[in-house]
């Protein structure tokens, strides 16, 4: 028996699986070697098996098709790499992968929440068995600390019956809520005097220059002032 292999573009093979064989005697199997599909879509490899008898005409050939699935791939776009406290991430997941059965391509999203972060919905708990396209854009992330925290999302593409694709890791920074600590060093001053109020903050945002404070002054009737003491 001769086995001829027809490999479509993007498919390579090794052993009898990729190269076929000549002069085989039955019984035998085509079950050695590998087939590798570098396409984004499934591809079909055709095996043509021809029986031969020395000195006689060949017997009728038999054709067998084998579908080679692609490796599952996740395309991930992080639309909001930085969010405010109690905000919602926005991660878009698509895929160029076209398997032979579309429903067999799914994605798992796992979430790693650091200390000080609590989450709700998909944002806080992830999701399993999602089909593309979809987004991680529901639920919230709450930062109870005074510093930024980084939440990590791992998106794993899966194709039923095949090895998982390469996981994609996305980080989302969650800002803390801004806090002002105010100390009034002179609760009572003489007329014509100057107040002495200190403002500090434990808050450490992603960009320190983004943390600012506004001071508004309310002057009662009969009181006038100058500078920051009167104008804030």
Image: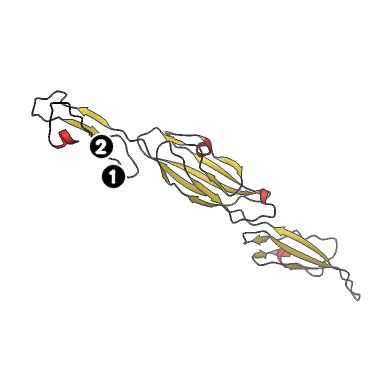
* Cα–Cα span, label 2 and label 1: 14 Å
In the rendered image, which quarter is residue 59 located in? bottom right
Cβ–Cβ under 8 Å for marks 2 and 1: no
User: Which residue is located at x 16 percent, y 33 percent?
Assistant: 230
Which quadrant of the figure contains the C terminus? top left
Left or right placement of residue 10 versus residue 26 in this view: left
Q: Which residue is mark 2?
A: 214
The residue lying at 12 percent from left, 32 percent from top is: 225
Rendered location of residue 121, percent (x, y): 52, 36
Point out the frontmost of discs 2 and 1: 2
Front residue of 224/13: it is: 224
* Mark number displayed over residue 209: 1
Q: Residue at x 43, y 38 (%)?
A: 87
Q: Residues within 10 Å of mark 2 (few under 14, many from 20)?
A: few
In the rendered view, tell whether residue 225 sits above or below residue 66.
Answer: above
For the N terminus, the quadrant is bottom right
Query: Horizontal and vertical percent for residue 98?
Result: 64, 56
């Amino acid at each position: 028996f001769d086995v001829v292999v027809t490999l479509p573009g993007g498919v390579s093979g090794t052993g009898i699986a990729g190269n076929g064989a000549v002069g085989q005697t039955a019984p035998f199997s085509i079950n050695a070697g590998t087939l590798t599909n570098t396409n984004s879509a499934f591809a079909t490899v055709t095996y043509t098996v021809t029986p031969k008898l020395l000195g006689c005409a060949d017997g009728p050939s038999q054709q067998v098709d084998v579908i080679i699935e692609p490796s599952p791939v996740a395309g991930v776009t992080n639309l909001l790499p930085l969010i405010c406290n109690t905000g919602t991430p926005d991660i878009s997941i698509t895929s160029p992968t076209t398997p032979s059965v579309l429903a067999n391509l799914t994605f798992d999203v796992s979430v790693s929440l650091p200390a000080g972060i609590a989450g709700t919905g998909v944002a806080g708990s992830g999701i399993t068995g999602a089909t593309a396209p979809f987004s991680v854009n529901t639920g919230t992330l709450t930062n109870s600390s005074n510093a930024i925290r980084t939440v990590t999302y791992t998106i794993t593409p899966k194709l039923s019956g095949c090895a998982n694709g390469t996981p994609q890791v996305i980080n989302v920074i969650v800002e803390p809520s801004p806090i002002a600590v105010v100390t009034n060093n002179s609760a009572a001053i003489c007329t014509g005097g100057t107040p002495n109020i200190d403002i500090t903050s434990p808050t450490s945002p992603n960009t320190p220059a983004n943390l600012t404070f506004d001071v508004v002054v309310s002057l009662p009737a009969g009181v006038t002032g100058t500078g920051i003491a009167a104008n804030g």
